[in-house]
Amino acid sequence: MSLSLNNYRKNNLQNAISGKIDLEFIDTKISKQAVKKVYQYGYSKVRFVNTDNNNTEAILINTAGGLTSSDIIENDIKMNENSKAVITSQAAEKIYKNISGIVSINTNIEMDKNSFIQWLPQETIIFDQSKTKRKTSVYINKYSKFLGLESVMFGRQLHGEKIKSGFFSDHWKIYLNEKLSFVDKFIVEENFKDKLLNKFIFNDVAFMSTIIFYSEELENNTKDIADFIINKSDTGGFSIINGIGIIKIVDKKPHNIKIKLNNLIQLIQKNVFNYNYGLPRIWNY
């Protein structure tokens, strides 16, 4: 797949893939259809599935099969008052070797009061010599609820792939009642291979995940989450910053971290949101 995409770019650099999704959700008490607006452009598509617990689950699809060079993916999500949605992706996003430019993945989520969104895409897999900037901005209302996840896998471990060079930036900005309350920016660029192997930096980890969550009652309902991090994840950490929960975990084996993610997400749903949803059905661990 990467060869065919790269060969295409060599002859069509001016036609780099561009995809955009624009979704707006409303209260199902107002309309039987919880989705008020659906806009899809380019290679970005969205499909909706029925769930057993009256939730709207949206699946984002990149029909190009991967990203490279100067590809741009944009996701804009608007959660109106009392709306609920779970958004995930059809498969892991793959970032192939770049010919020129940098892949950009930008997500903006805007939330009104009493809305609840679970942003749970599957992981991004970066290949050797790829270049990626990923930015997620969330505008949380004090009375809304948010659960978000972003993960990255450094090469396909089962294929013996290793990252020698490249660029990867992961940037979160969380606003609470229009006030910037949390910023996290992670960058790996020069000497990518050396940093991945350095025991004081990555120690040869294969997979890294960030979980961010918010509820007005968060700080009173996190004991089980903290205990899990302490007892079940020796390569993870948990903090509460300005009322926002932050978890980071890494592992040398992707399968191990996916089991931890499964457990953590369900713990957060149960303890923070009093909500037993589980993982999106398309996640197949």
Image (cartoon, grey):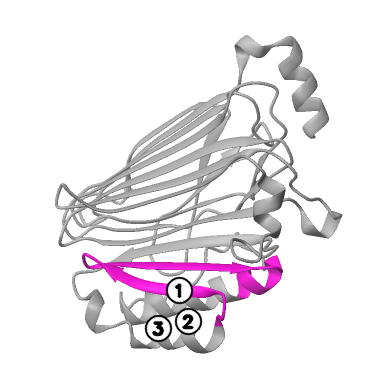
Magenta stretch containing residue 2, yes or no?
no
Q: Residue at the location (23% across, 83% down)?
A: 220
Q: Is residue 170 left or right of 95 when viewed as pictured?
A: left
Look at the numbered discs 1 and 2 and tell me whether their residues touch, using CB distance below 8 Å: yes
At x 70% / y 51%, what residue is drawn? 194
Instruction: Characterize the local packing of mark 1: few (<14), some (14-19) or many (20 or more) Cα atoms within 10 angstroms.
Output: some
Counting from the top left corner in percent of width and height, residue 20 is at 46, 30
Q: Foreground: 259 or 234?
A: 234
Q: Amino acid at mark 2?
A: Ile
Question: Bounds of the magenta span?
Answer: 233-259
The residue where tag 3 is placed is 226
Per the model, the C-alpha gap separating discs 1 and 2 is 6 Å
Residue type at mark 1?
Gly
Identify residue type, mark 3: Ala
Quadrant where the N terminus sits is top right
Image vertical order of residue 109 relative to residue 261, above or below:
above
What label sits on residue 216 in the rendered view?
none
* Residue at numbered disc 1: 237
Q: SS at mark 2?
A: helix
Q: Which residue is mark 2?
A: 229
